[in-house]
Amino acid sequence: MAGNKNHSVPAATVPRLSRYLRKLQEMQSRGTSTVSSRQLAEAVGTNPAQIRKDLSYFGEFGIRGVGYDVASLIEELKKCLGLDRTWNTIIIGAGKLGTALARYRAFQKQGFNLLGMFDSAAAVIGKSRGVGHVKSTDELEDFITSNRVDIAIITTPASVAQELIDRVVAAGVPSVLNFAPIRAHVKEPAIVRQVDLSTELMSLSFYLNNQGC
Amino acid sequence: MAGNKNHSVPAATVPRLSRYLRKLQEMQSRGTSTVSSRQLAEAVGTNPAQIRKDLSYFGEFGIRGVGYDVASLIEELKKCLGLDRTWNTIIIGAGKLGTALARYRAFQKQGFNLLGMFDSAAAVIGKSRGVGHVKSTDELEDFITSNRVDIAIITTPASVAQELIDRVVAAGVPSVLNFAPIRAHVKEPAIVRQVDLSTELMSLSFYLNNQGC
DNA sequence: GTGTGTGAAAGTATTCACAGCC
DNA sequence: GGCTGTGAATACTTTCACACAC
């Protein structure tokens, strides 16, 4: 069986695949060569049937009575997740958070290639922030036109985030990872994901506060 | 495992409440005093029924035929989310990301009070990182014993994250917000939430790659 | 025997649609 | 007229349980 289309893959499955991948890579580095759905489920904190069901959307990767070969399951998952290629990224916002991400080289190893950083503050433009010089946001459109940019990572203040997202999407960037504390919107067919510190803190607050309201 | 959750509020509702709150605060600062579920839904990108259903788990906050009073809905949501009080936090890991979070004062305004930062590297201990001096992780247990710490924010490398989480939870911290790229586990009744950059990037990769696998 | 792959069942979440109130 | 609050309906997700392969 070949050519599963991913519009039938449940949205909830996708982030789990990346957690399976990470755990499998960790197991591989410790010398594990075979794993059952039960062992992997234990390691990532889920149910074995969840894992088998998730994998079943993409193919049959296991051997009955045995389990999964760690190395080949890693390869399959990377293929499913589109990690058998390189994605070009830019970071917009060269503050502390943007700089932290630029210097976080771990994801370069997974195929995310940081092409450049942009900021609007004269004080940081031209400075080195782990990936060449910081460019002016004025140059965004030109840069996107002459380089394939797959993912724009937004680490600007909330006040300018949506405007910058609109600009990069209009210039042709197909996806956005937004760290600014706004609910960003993009025009179809572009896609956006949010990383939202304050929502996570407030969720903790809710569960800590379990006699309130 | 037996997961005893708060009341009967769906887990999916909780993070949405914080997004409603953020948008309402933004609307209030622009002078809006009344809002209908349709207007709020439009602003946050969801369905009006979703909002009414989410709010209905906590009470009846609206006026039929009119909508919601922005100011009083803000107050109600803050109460529901436990934001009518102060939560004490610490940051463990004084690298770029930890420092970025420490300097991000926006969440101080929502009632999250940063008590201190901890690191294990001699080079940063004692340095100023936006909130007094960075303390040694050796002092964690003493600090937690003598100060009420509600939330530990983990911004360390993956290799030491789970060990530090185990230590702070054992010392009595009831909740953890983990930025390290591991799937952290905590012993009941402590709670943990993950902010996972690489999972988000890989999810984008999956959807960008829509003819793969 | 062991463990996968998968329909069916159970459990959650979202959306509809309308009664009731302003 | 408008809009909320909510049971009912739909859609989605997880878990069960067992046929089947090793």
Image (spheres, coloured by chain):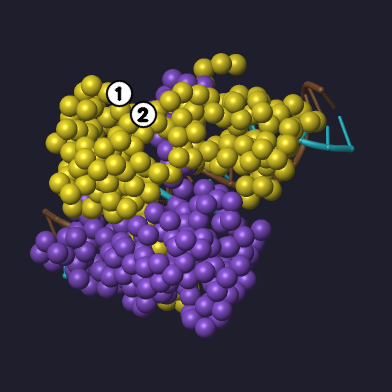
Chain colours: A yellow, B purple, C cyan, D brown
x, y percentage for residue B205?
Answer: 43, 31
Badge 1, how many Cα within 10 Å: few under 14, some, many 20+? some
x, y percentage for residue A189?
Answer: 29, 29
Quick check: B14 above or below A68? Answer: below
Q: State which chain disc 1 sits on.
A: A
Residue A148's label in the rendered image is 1
Instruction: Please determine if labels 2 and 1 lie on a single subunit.
Output: yes
Q: Which residue appears at 55% of the width and 50% of the height?
A: B158
Q: Nearer the viewer, residue A68 or B23?
A: A68
Q: Single out the residue that lies furthest toward the bottom.
A: B146
Q: Is residue B49 visible?
A: no
Q: Nearer the viewer, residue D19 or D6?
A: D19
Q: Is residue A61 left or right of residue B33?
A: right
Q: Which residue appears at 45% of the width and 40% of the height?
A: A105
Q: Are marks 2 and 1 in contact (CB under 8 Å)?
A: yes
Residue A180's label in the rendered image is none
Q: Single out the residue that lies furthest toward the front.
A: B123
Q: Is residue C9 left or right of residue A209?
A: right
Secondary structure found at label 1: loop
Quick check: B107 above or below A148? Answer: below
Secondary structure found at label 2: strand
Give the amino acid at mark 1. Arg
Image quadrant in which the N terminus of chain B is located: bottom right
Q: Which residue appears at 45% of the width and 62% of the height?
A: B124
Q: Which residue appears at 61% of the width and 67% of the height?
A: B167
Q: Nearer the viewer, residue B53 or B186?
A: B186
Indicate which disc, 2 or 1, sits on the residue closer to the N terminus.
Answer: 2
Tell me the residue that label 2 is attached to: A88
Give the amino acid at mark 2. Asn
Q: Is residue B188 visible?
A: yes
Q: Single out the residue that lies furthest toward the top.
A: A2
Badge 2, how many Cα within 10 Å: few under 14, some, many 20+? some
